[in-house]
C-alpha cells in the first residue's frame, strides 16, 4: 500500500511503520489501547496519520525506547502540543489526585466543588461520599447537566490517571458501580411496555461487544426524567437481539453506543428492521467510524443532543 495518495492526505499505517521503524502490530496496539493513532482520513475514507499524529507516535516511540511505560508515554504524547518534546506528567508520578478537565467548573465555584468532591471521594474509595456526591449532582442539576459537567470530567480523569500510571483500576470499577446505581435509581423499570398503546419506547443498547454502558444509563435516566418510555438493553448487545427487541416492543427510536473503535463499525445499522413510521436511529460515543455512518443514522455528541435527536423534550 504505502503513502500512494501523497503525504498531504496523511500516511497509512504501513508507511508510518516503515518511517519510524515500529511494527505495524505495535502501532495498532498504541491506537487501540491508548488512543495514539490516526485522526485523518484518506480519499476513500481510510484512516490516515496526519503530521500531528506522526509527531505523537514519534514522541511515544522515543519515550518507550527511553524506558517510559507505554501507558504513561501515551498520556505524555497526547498532551504534548505538536512539535514540543513531551515529558511524562508530573501529576502522575506520585500524586493521588485525578487530573480534571471540567470547563463548566472554571467559572462556577459550586460546580468546581462538586467535581472535586466526587474525584476526591473516588480516589479515597469512599463509597458513601461518592454516592452522596453523585446523587446530589443529579438531584440539583438534572441528569444531562450532572452527567456532562460533573460525572464525565471525573470519569475521563480517572481514565487518564489509569492510562498514565497503570493503577487505580479499583477506583474505575467502584466509580462505575456507584454511578450505575445512582443513574438506575433515576430510571425505574417501565411497566408493561409490550401491552402499551401509542408511541413506542426508545430502545437503548451498546454496540456488539461494547462493554462501556454508563453513557447509556445516563441517557436512560435523562429519558426517564423527561417522562419518555425506554428500554435499556445494556452492554454488548448482539445485532439479532437488538433487531428482535425493536420488533417486539415496536420501538420508534433506537440509540446505540460505541465507546471504542473496535466496536465502532456502523455498517450493520442499515440492516435494522424497517418500521412504519421509519425507525429513528441515533448513535453516540467516540468509537463510531463516522465517515461510514449510514444516512439513516444521526450522531449525537451529548445527552442533550441525543434527547433532541430522539425528539424528546427535557423537563429541566
Ligand atoms: C468506566 C470505564 C470502564 C468501566 C466500564 C463500566 C461500564 N459499565 O460502563 C470498566 C472498568 C468495565 C472498563 C473496562 C475497560 N476499559 Co474502560 N473506561 C472507562 C472510563 C473511565 C469511562 C467510560 C465512559 O463511561 N465514558 C463516557 C464519557 C465519560 O467519556 P467520553 O466518551 O470521552 O465522553 C465524551 C463524548 O462521548 C460525549 N458523551 C459523554 N457521555 C455521553 C452520553 C451520550 C448519550 C452521548 C450522546 C454523548 C456523550 O461527551 C464527552 C465529551 O466529548 C473510560 C475513560 C474515558 N475517557 O471514557 C475508560 C476507557 C474507555 N476504557 C478503556 C479501556 C482500554 C478499557 C478496557 C479494554 C481495559 C482493559 N484493558 O481491560 C476494558 C474493556 C472494555 C471493553 N472491552 O469494552 C480506554 C479505551 C481506549 C480506546 N481509545 O479504545 C479508556 C478511554 C481509558 C483509557 N484512557 O485508556 N472501562
Image (cartoon, rainbow, N blue to C red):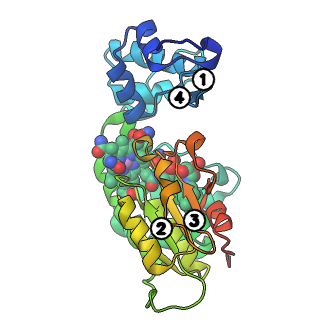
For mark 4, what is the residue? Answer: 47
Q: Where is residue 218 in the image (x, y as percent from the top left)?
A: 50, 66
Q: Is residue 162 left or right of residue 315?
A: left
Sequence order check: which comes first, mark 4 or mark 3? Answer: 4
Comparing marks 3 and 2, which lies closer to the viewer?
Answer: 2
Quickly name the residue at label 2: 204
Secondary structure of the residue carrying numbered label 1: loop
Q: Which of marks 1 and 4 is nearer the N terminus?
A: 4
Q: Please say whether residue 181 is visible from this viewpoint.
A: yes
- The answer for how far apart the CA atoms under marks 3 and 1 are is 30 Å
Residue 280 appears at what percent x and percent y? 60, 66
Q: Which mark is residue 146?
A: 3
Q: Residues within 10 Å of mark 1 (few under 14, many from 20)?
A: few
Q: Is residue 219 left or right of residue 35?
A: right
Q: Picture coordinates of residue 103 (x, y %)?
A: 65, 49
Image quadrant where residue 130 sits: bottom left
* Residue that carries the numbered disc 1 in the rendered image: 81
The mark nearer the N terminus, 2 or 1, is: 1
Picture layout, residue 102 above or below residue 24: below
Amino acid at each position: 500500500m504505502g503513502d500512494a495518495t501523497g503525504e498531504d492526505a496523511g500516511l497509512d499505517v504501513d508507511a508510518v511503520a516503515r518511517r519510524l521503524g515500529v511494527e505495524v502490530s505495535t502501532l495498532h496496539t498504541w491506537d487501540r489501547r491508548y488512543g495514539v493513532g490516526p485522526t485523518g482520513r484518506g480519499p476513500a475514507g481510510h484512516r490516515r496519520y496526519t503530521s500531528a499524529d506522526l509527531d505523537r507516535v514519534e514522541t511515544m516511540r522515543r519515550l518507550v525506547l527511553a524506558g517510559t511505560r507505554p501507558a504513561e508515554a501515551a498520556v505524555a504524547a497526547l498532551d504534548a502540543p505538536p512539535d514540543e518534546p513531551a515529558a511524562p506528567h508530573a501529576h502522575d508520578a506520585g500524586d493521588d489526585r485525578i487530573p480534571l478537565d471540567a470547563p463548566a467548573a472554571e467559572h462556577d465555584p459550586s460546580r468546581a466543588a462538586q467535581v472535586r468532591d466526587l474525584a476526591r471521594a473516588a480516589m479515597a474509595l469512599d463509597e458513601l461520599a461518592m454516592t452522596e456526591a453523585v446523587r446530589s449532582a443529579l438531584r440539583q442539576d438534572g441528569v444531562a447537566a450532572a452527567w456532562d459537567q460533573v460525572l464525565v470530567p471525573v470519569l475521563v480523569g480517572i481514565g487518564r490517571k489509569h492510562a498514565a500510571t497503570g493503577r487505580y483500576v479499583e477506583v474505575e470499577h467502584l466509580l462505575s458501580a456507584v454511578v450505575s446505581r445512582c443513574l438506575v435509581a433515576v430510571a425505574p423499570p417501565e411497566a408493561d411496555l409490550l401491552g402499551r398503546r401509542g408511541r413506542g419506547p426508545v430502545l437503548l443498547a451498546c454496540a456488539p461487544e461494547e462493554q462501556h454502558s454508563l453513557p447509556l444509563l445516563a441517557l436512560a435516566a435523562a429519558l426517564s426524567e423527561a417522562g419518555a418510555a425506554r428500554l435499556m438493553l445494556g452492554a454488548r448487545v448482539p445485532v439479532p437481539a437488538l433487531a428482535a427487541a425493536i420488533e417486539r416492543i415496536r420501538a420508534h427510536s433506537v440509540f446505540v453506543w460505541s465507546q471504542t473503535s473496535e466496536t465502532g463499525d456502523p455498517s450493520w445499522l442499515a440492516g435494522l428492521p424497517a418500521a412504519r413510521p421509519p425507525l429513528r436511529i441515533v448513535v453516540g460515543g467516540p468509537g463510531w467510524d463516522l465517515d461510514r455512518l449510514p444516512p439513516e443514522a444521526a450522531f449525537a455528541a451529548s445527552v442533550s443532543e441525543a434527547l433532541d435527536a430522539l425528539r424528546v423534550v427535557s423537563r429541566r
